[in-house]
Amino acid sequence: MNIEKRFSTDRATPAPENGGRGRVAGLVARPRLWMIAAIVVILAVAAFAYARGGKAPAPVASPPPRVTVTVPGRQAVAGSITTTGTLAARREMPVGIAGEGGMISRVLVEPGDWVAAGQVLATIERSVQVQEGASLAASINVARADAALAQSELDRAKALVARGFISKADIDRRTATRDAANARVKVAQAQYGQAGARIGRLDIRAPAAGLVLTRAVEPGQVVGPGSGTLFRIAKGGEMELAARLAEQDLARLRIGLPAQVTPVGTATPFRGTIWQLSPIIDPQTRQGVARIALTYDPALRPGGFAAATIASGSVDAPLLPESAVLSDAAGNYVFVVGPGNAVRRQAVKVGDVSDAGITIVSGLTGTEQVVLAAGAFLNPGDKVTPVRAPVQRPAA
């Protein structure tokens, strides 16, 4: 009994040792108070969450991203088509052997020479043909002598008819003889003319005035009808650029439109006009040919490569910067901000590309809000905050 009472007394009233044991007990009690306060706060939060239906507070939503948009409108855009092609003579005339041929005795022109219509380009050795011509000329004289004799005999016979020495049948025979002799004269003359024509065809002549492009014959060479082309001449020196174009570009062109042609190796453009458009489209490449007529210049060499810019008139269409137009396997497209500031994809067909921007041929009316940039980071249906791009005013 006394032991329990003393033990209780000792726990209730600790014996002070220099006042230190009571201070330590106070420090131990303080963390316990902080723990109790924390538990109370947790319980209060849990009670608040339970009062709201057992759900945690919803996080605060971030605002939609800001994107720069533009309303392009419509404006008159000068259309142009850029293409490449090969230079050639507009009318190339191959010149070969027109007669029986022979050995070339002289060549009178070189590539790059200008020739007139009918000018001799080369000659073929003709000594045999000249002798044949002389023989035929002599046969004409023989035929004429026979015709003169037949005419004299007929005249004498007609004088004797009145005296009864010559019958009417004799007169008819002598008349026939005279007519046959005259006919032989004409045959001899025709043969002589034919020989002269053959000799004339031994001169290789230019069929029209123009520029000699190539020469494929030398003196001493034996040529004939199967020798092929000996000279090539550009009629009038006129040149052209044969430019291959896609069928949709070819449909925008017409004969007479101006063009600028720049050959490879020079920065000087040459003015030309379209003189012919291909009436067919290649089913394999889906392309046609536009032929651009050019006047002669030494820098325009047939067979060379050149670039061309063809003016295709003006179109009324929206114009967008390159950053606004995207493309993938499905084609070209832009992002448009629609109702509720939701982004949607809009397929477009592009036209000419210039320093001013890209012409939109179809797909936009010009009143849409088109995303200028950052389109690659957007997806259809995304919510955005559109910000109108500042209007670019021309410098005074």
Image (tube, rainbow, N blue to C red):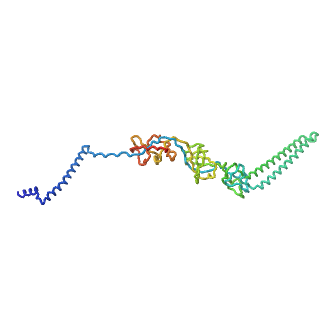
Position of 228 compared to 363: left or right? right
Position of 340 compared to 115: left or right? left
- The one nearer the camera, 278 or 210, is 210
Single out the residue that lies furthest toward the bottom. 17
Residue 251 visible in this rendered orientation of the protein? no
Q: Position of residue 5 (x, y in %)?
A: 7, 56
Position of 73 compared to 144: left or right? left
Single out the residue that lies furthest toward the front. 396
Single out the residue that lies furthest toward the left. 1
Residue at image coords 55%, 42%: 313
Q: Relative to 128, does residue 58 appear above or below in the rendering?
A: above
Count of numbered marks: 0
Q: Position of residue 240 (x, y in %)?
A: 62, 48
Q: Position of residue 362 (x, y in %)?
A: 49, 42
Position of 95 compared to 246: left or right? right
- The one nearer the camera, 75 or 390, is 390
Quadrant holding the N terminus: bottom left
- The one nearer the camera, 72 or 135, is 72
Q: Position of residue 137 (x, y in %)?
A: 82, 51
Single out the residue that lies furthest toward the right. 163
Residue at image coords 55%, 46%: 81
Residue 108 visible in this rendered orientation of the protein? yes
